[in-house]
C-alpha cells in the first residue's frame, strides 16, 4: 500500500480526497494544517504529499513545501485555488512535482497521484554520460563524483534524457513518459528543465540543451 498525506484546511475537501484515496487502496493521513507535518514525514515516510497552498496559521503551502523538501524526497502535488502561472511556477521551482487547481475533478487527482507514484517507484540501472551518473534505482545523481540533490521529477526527467544521449527528446515525449499523459501544459516541462539545469550547472558546464521548436537533448559539454 502507498502512503499518502493530505494537508487541506477545508473539512469537506480533505474528507472527500482522503475517502477517494482510501477507496483506491492507499493508506491516508489527513491533516487540517502543517502543525504535525514534520513528525508525519519522519515517522510515516509517505510516498506522496498532497499539499494545499492556502492554509491557516503562520505557514502556507509554499512554506510547508520547503519543510517537505528539507526532510524527504517524497512526491508532492500542490492543490491551489490560484490559477495564475506565477503561483504554479513558484511551486514547481521550489520542488513540487505536480499541481492541480481547484475546483478539480477527483478522478484527475487520483490519476495524478498514481502517475506520481509510478515515477517515484520506478527503478533501473545506472546511466553514465561524461561526468554525469544517474543511478535510478538508488535515487542518486552524481556529477564529477559530487552528489546532486534533485526532486523525484527532476531525476526522472534527467533519466529519460539520459536514455537518448545526444538525441532530441520532445516535450510531448517527456509529458507522456514522466507524467503519463500529454494533454497538459508544456510549461510544466520548461519549469522543471530550468530547475534541473540550475542544479546540474552548479557542478559543471551546461549539459542539457534546448533545440528550439523540437525539445531538449543531453550532451557531454
Image (spheres, rainbow, N blue to C red):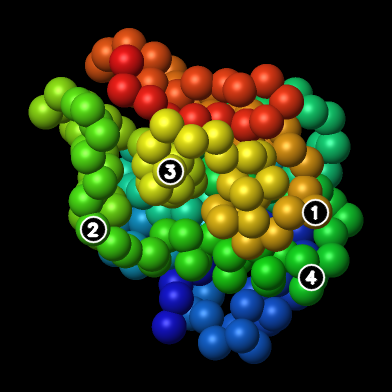
Question: Residue 21: which quarter of the image?
Answer: bottom right
Q: Horizontal and vertical percent for residue 146?
A: 15, 27
Q: Nearer the viewer, mark 1 or mark 4?
A: 1
Residue 111: assigned label? none
Q: CA distance from mark 4 to mark 3?
A: 35 Å
| Lower position in the chain sequence, tag 2 or tag 1 | 2
Residue carrying label 4? 106
Q: Residues within 10 Å of mark 4 (few under 14, many from 20)?
A: few
Residue carrying label 2? 125
Q: CA distance from mark 1 to mark 3?
A: 23 Å
The answer to whether the residues at label 1 and label 3 have Cβ atoms under 8 Å apart is: no
Q: Visible in this render: residue 137? A: yes
Q: Residue at x 84, y 66 (%)?
A: 105
Q: Horizontal and vertical percent for residue 211?
A: 61, 22
| Lower position in the chain sequence, tag 1 or tag 4 | 4
Residue carrying label 1? 183
Farthest-out residue, front: 167
| Lower position in the chain sequence, tag 2 or tag 3 | 2
Residue 164: assigned label? 3
Amino acid at each position: 500500500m502507498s502512503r499518502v498525506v493530505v494537508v487541506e484546511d477545508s473539512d469537506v475537501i480533505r474528507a472527500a480526497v482522503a475517502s477517494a484515496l482510501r477507496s483506491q487502496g492507499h493508506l491516508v493521513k489527513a491533516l487540517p494544517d502543517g502543525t504535525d507535518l514534520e513528525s508525519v514525514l519522519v515517522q510515516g515516510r509517505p510516498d506522496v504529499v498532497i499539499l494545499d497552498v492556502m492554509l491557516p496559521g503562520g505557514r502556507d503551502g509554499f512554506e510547508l513545501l520547503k519543510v517537505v523538501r528539507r526532510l524527504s524526497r517524497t512526491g508532492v502535488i500542490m492543490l491551489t485555488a490560484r490559477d495564475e502561472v506565477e503561483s504554479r511556477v513558484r511551486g514547481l521551482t521550489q520542488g513540487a512535482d505536480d499541481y492541480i487547481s481547484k475546483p478539480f475533478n477527483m478522478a484527475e487527482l487520483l490519476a495524478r497521484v498514481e502517475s506520481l507514484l509510478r515515477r517515484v517507484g520506478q527503478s533501473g540501472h545506472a546511466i553514465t554520460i561524461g561526468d554525469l551518473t544517474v543511478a535510478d534505482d538508488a535515487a542518486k545523481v552524481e556529477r564529477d563524483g559530487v552528489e546532486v540533490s534533485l526532486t523525484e521529477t527532476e531525476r526522472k526527467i534527467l533519466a529519460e534524457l539520459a536514455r537518448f544521449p545526444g538525441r532530441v527528446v520532445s516535450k510531448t515525449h517527456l509529458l507522456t513518459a514522466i507524467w503519463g499523459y500529454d494533454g497538459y501544459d508544456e510549461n510544466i516541462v520548461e519549469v522543471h528543465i530550468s530547475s534541473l539545469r540550475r542544479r546540474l550547472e552548479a557542478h559543471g558546464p551546461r549539459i542539457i540543451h534546448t533545440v528550439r521548436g523540437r525539445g531538449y537533448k543531453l550532451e557531454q559539454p
